[in-house]
Image: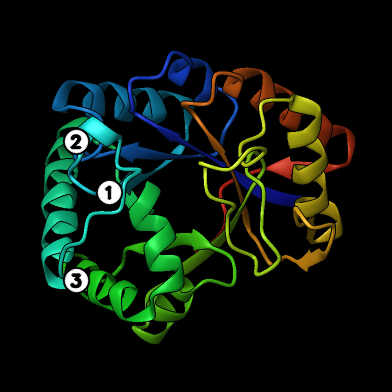
């Protein structure tokens, strides 16, 4: 049977984390930078442990006011320091919970910036490697993030999004534009099936993008997150695609 990882960004104060942990195979947990707290991190890690879900760290800009979705004009080395500080906080809580952190996925504006900027991604992931060389990087398929991580010898997991629109270059359409975020489960299901079964994504201009994604992401803070997750789970099952954590 074909399989694919289904990951969600959790620990951000959204309503459906516990329910989503019963569906997804990987959870990217906020580390207190853009969202989250020690209490939320611990609770989410324990929930993932009970559900048998793989966990990763989800660091972003330290900017909770903007939920990490505003690009901050900081030097790359300063950003790398912020990322590692968040990883250190997460690692300490994960150790207490007895739940390993096996990958890193950047959040929001930092994720998008590093997807386009090789030098930034390289600086961040060089710091991640120094922190924990065995850490995998979960990042946008075909992006500069993946190229930088691979160049450093880090394990990588290419991902694609079920609930976000793509532009013709394979990058995510900015959230400021209409149609950039899917709230209709049917739309997200169609994209997820395209990724998992057809290995392709239809861009916002109608063009077809090839996909090598090993993981499908949905956003836990999407108001339709639980409906989307359930619909994707059911549709993948009907298509003969199992949900399981991607090998690294």
Residue reaching furthest to the front: 177
Q: Residues within 10 Å of mark 1 (few under 14, many from 20)?
A: many
Residue sitting at the far bottom? 151
| CB atoms of marks 1 and 2 within 8 Å | no
Tell me the SS state at disc 1. loop
- Splitting the image into 4 quarters, where does residue 99 fall? top left
Q: Residue 195: x percent and y percent?
A: 76, 53
Nearer to us in this view, 223 or 233: 223
Q: CA distance from mark 1 to mark 2?
A: 9 Å
Is 188 in front, or is 235? Answer: 188
Residue 58 seen from this side: yes
Residue in view at x 38 percent, y 79 percent: 118
**At 86% from the left edge and 42% from the top edge, which residue is drawn?**
240
Q: Which mark is residue 76?
A: 3
Distance in Å between CA atoms under marks 1 and 3:
13 Å
Question: Which numbered disc flags the more N-terminal residue, 1 or 3?
Answer: 1
Write down the residue under mark 1. Answer: 60
The residue carrying mark 2 is: 32
Label 3: which secondary element:
helix
Residue 95 percent across, percent down from the top left:
17, 40
Pointer 3 local density, CA inside 10 Å: few below 14, some 14–19, many at least 20: some
Estimate how packed mark 2 is, as few (under 14), some (14 to 19) or many (20 or more) residues with alpha carbons within 10 Å: many
Q: Earlier in the sequence, mark 3 or mark 2?
A: 2
Residue 104 appears in view: no
Specify the quadrant of the image occupied by residue 200: bottom right
């Amino acid at each position: 049977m074909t399989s694919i990882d289904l990951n969600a960004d959790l620990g951000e104060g959204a309503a459906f984390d516990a329910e989503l942990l019963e569906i997804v195979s990987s959870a990217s947990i906020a580390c207190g930078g853009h969202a989250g707290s020690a209490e939320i991190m611990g609770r989410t890690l324990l929930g993932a442990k009970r559900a048998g879900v793989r966990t990763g760290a989800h660091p972003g800009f330290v900017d909770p006011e903007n939920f990490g979705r505003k690009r901050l004009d900081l030097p790359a080395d300063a950003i790398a320091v912020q990322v590692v500080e968040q990883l250190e906080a997460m690692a300490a809580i994960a150790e207490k919970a007895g739940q390993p952190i096996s990958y890193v996925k950047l959040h929001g504006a930092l994720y998008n910036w590093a997807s386009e900027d090789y030098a930034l991604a390289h600086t961040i992931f060089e710091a991640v490697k120094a922190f924990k060389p065995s850490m995998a990087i979960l990042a946008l398929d075909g992006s500069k993030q993946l190229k930088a991580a691979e160049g450093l010898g880090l394990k990588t997991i290419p991902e694609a999004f079920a609930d976000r629109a793509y532009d013709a270059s394979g990058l995510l359409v900015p959230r400021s534009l209409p149609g950039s975020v899917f709230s209709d489960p049917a739309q997200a299901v169609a994209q997820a099936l395209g990724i998992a079964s057809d290995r392709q994504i239809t861009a916002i201009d109608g063009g077809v993008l090839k996909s090598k994604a090993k993981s499908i992401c949905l956003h836990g803070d999407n108001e339709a997150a639980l409906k989307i997750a359930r619909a994707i789970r059911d549709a993948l099952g009907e298509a003969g695609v199992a949900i399981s954590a991607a090998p690294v």
